[in-house]
């Protein structure tokens, strides 16, 4: 599969986070969510230092690449020294690598980030930068034109299942305005990291990306109604899956994932 983050999208992309999948059947879970309609697999890499959690590394990425040769792998480094992991993940088959601006040395933040972006590109991957909820968009000044993706965190990095922080939508709208004003110079993708039990953000003009965690693959009616979908439309989509309730006991079911992705794609733009 081509790197879906290398070009301007024609519709929002759904990147399914594998962080909360069943690791005993990881390839099966990943294949299931792709079959349900997800566009990319999102690998949350944590080092128990930059964030207080420990997850996966290049070996897991390499194993998934062998199992899913056509998948597009979107790696999100939540680590203190992302430079240590660029070559290993490139060798493991990653298509895209995002690192945190906050992990850069404060005295030379932009220079260090630019050098790392260049390194990622030299290794044949697309490059993105992630911003924690409190981090100002202004800290990317002078760097946006060199990025393929900007990831706006709507939760604090480290753990799944956190509540969506709606305040980050203003930051995302400001970034979107910059993209629309200078599309030829700015990132192909704006991504929001969050869970489907929170109000979805569907960016206009084709710029948008949702990361759908497998532990929350069942989108809630309440959130979708808040995003602008009518209850009738939700029921129509759910009804195509044998009239079962939207929130069955098994959040990992292929049917539930398929419904979530259909509804996320149809959510209209957030009110401005």
Image (cartoon, rainbow, N blue to C red):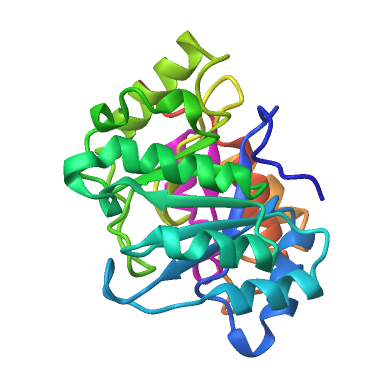
Using the image, determine if residue 186 lies above or below residue 62. Answer: above
- Viewer-proximal residue, 194 or 98? 98
- Classify residue 254 as left or right of residue 217: right
- Classify residue 216 as left or right of residue 26: left
The boundaries of the magenta stretch are 208-229
Image quadrant assignment for residue 103: bottom left
- Percent coordinates x, y for residue 210 in the rendering: 53, 46
The residue depicted at 83 percent of the width and 59 percent of the height is 70
- Classify residue 230 as left or right of residue 53: right
Which quarter of the figure is the C terminus placed in? top left
Q: Would residue 46 be seen by someone viewing this image from the given angle? A: yes
- Percent coordinates x, y for residue 152 in the rendering: 38, 42
- Classify residue 40 as left or right of residue 52: right
- Percent coordinates x, y for residue 23 in the rendering: 60, 85
- Viewer-proximal residue, 22 or 86? 86
The residue depicted at 24 percent of the width and 27 percent of the height is 138
The residue depicted at 42 percent of the width and 52 percent of the height is 99
Image quadrant assignment for residue 7: top right
Q: Is residue 201 magenta?
A: no
- Percent coordinates x, y for residue 166 in the rendering: 28, 41
Using the image, determine if residue 149 lies above or below residue 239. Answer: above
């Amino acid at each position: 599969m081509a790197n879906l983050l290398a070009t301007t999208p024609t519709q929002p992309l759904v990147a399914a986070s594998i962080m909360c999948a069943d690791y005993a059947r990881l390839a099966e879970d990943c294949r299931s969510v792709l079959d349900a309609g997800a566009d990319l697999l999102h690998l949350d890499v944590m080092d128990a230092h930059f964030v207080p959690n420990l997850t996966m590394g290049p070996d897991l990425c390499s194993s998934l690449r062998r199992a899913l040769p056509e998948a597009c792998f979107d790696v999100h480094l939540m680590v203190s020294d992302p430079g240590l992991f660029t070559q290993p993940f490139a060798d493991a088959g990653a298509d895209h690598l995002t690192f945190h601006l906050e992990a850069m040395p404060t005295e030379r933040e932009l220079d260090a980030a630019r050098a790392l972006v260049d390194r990622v590109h030299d290794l044949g991957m697309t490059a993105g930068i992630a911003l924690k909820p409190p981090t100002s968009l202004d800290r990317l000044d002078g760097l946006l034109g060199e990025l393929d993706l900007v990831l706006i965190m709507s939760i604090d990095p480290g753990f799944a299942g956190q509540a969506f922080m709606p305040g980050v939508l203003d930051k995302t709208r400001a970034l979107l305005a910059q993209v629309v004003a200078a599309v030829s110079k700015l990132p192909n993708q704006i991504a929001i990291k969050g869970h489907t039990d929170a109000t979805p953000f569907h960016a206009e003009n084709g710029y948008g990306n949702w990361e759908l965690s497998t532990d929350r693959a069942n989108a809630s009616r309440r959130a979708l109604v808040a995003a602008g979908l009518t209850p009738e439309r939700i029921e129509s989509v759910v009804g195509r899956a044998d009239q079962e309730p939207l929130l069955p006991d098994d959040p990992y079911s292929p049917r539930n994932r398929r419904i979530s992705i259909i509804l996320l794609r149809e959510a209209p733009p957030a009110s401005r």
